[in-house]
Image (spheres, rainbow, N blue to C red):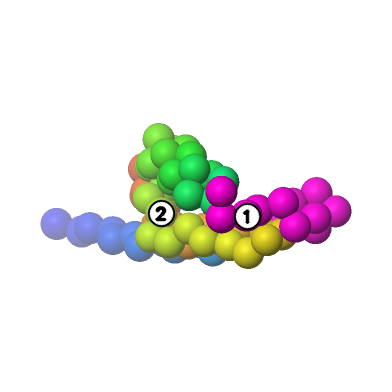
Amino acid sequence: MPQSLVKLYVHIIFSMKNRRPLLDEEIENALYSYLGGICNRLECFPLKISGHKEHVHIFSHISPRKLP
């Protein structure tokens, strides 16, 4: 029986408007949890979410069911 296996990983990087340093320790954990929840609902399971003062990185596994 033929079978296709897919493991697709994406690295998403986005920055704050005008690259302003808005991300600080007070909000980063809440922001990362929020982004992780959004990813999980979209079946885009995050392996690592981190960032710096002006940008955020999301390294995630994409579900094959979400592929066109």
Return the disc, 1 or 2, that comes first in the chain's sequence.
1
Under mark 2, the amino acid is: Pro
**Which segment did they paint magenta?**
14-26
Q: Nearer the viewer, mark 1 or mark 2?
A: 1
Distance Cα–Cα, label 1 vs label 2: 21 Å
Evaluate whether residue 12 shows in this view: no
Between 48 and 41, the one nearer to me in the picture: 48
Viewer-nearest residue: 66 or 28? 28
- Secondary structure beneath dot 2 equals strand
Residue 46 placement (x, y as % from top left): 41, 54
Give the residue at mark 2.
Answer: 46
Q: Residue at x 56, y 55 (%)?
A: 25
Residue count near mark 2 (Cα–Cα under 10 Å), binned few <14, some 14–19, many ≥20: many
Q: What is the residue that sits farthest to the top in this orientation?
A: 41
Residue at 75 percent across and 57 percent down: it is 21
Residue 6 sits above or below residue 34 on the image: below
Which residue bears the numbered disc 1? 24
Q: Residue placed farthest to the left in the image?
A: 1
Q: Amino acid at mark 1?
A: Asp
Looking at the image, residue 17 lies above or below residue 52: above
Is 25 left or right of 64, judged from the image as shown?
right
Image: 6 above or below 29:
below
Residue 48 in view in this figure: yes
Residue 36: x percent and y percent?
44, 45
In magenta stretch: residue 18 = yes
| Residue drawn at point x = 22 percent, y = 58 percent | 3
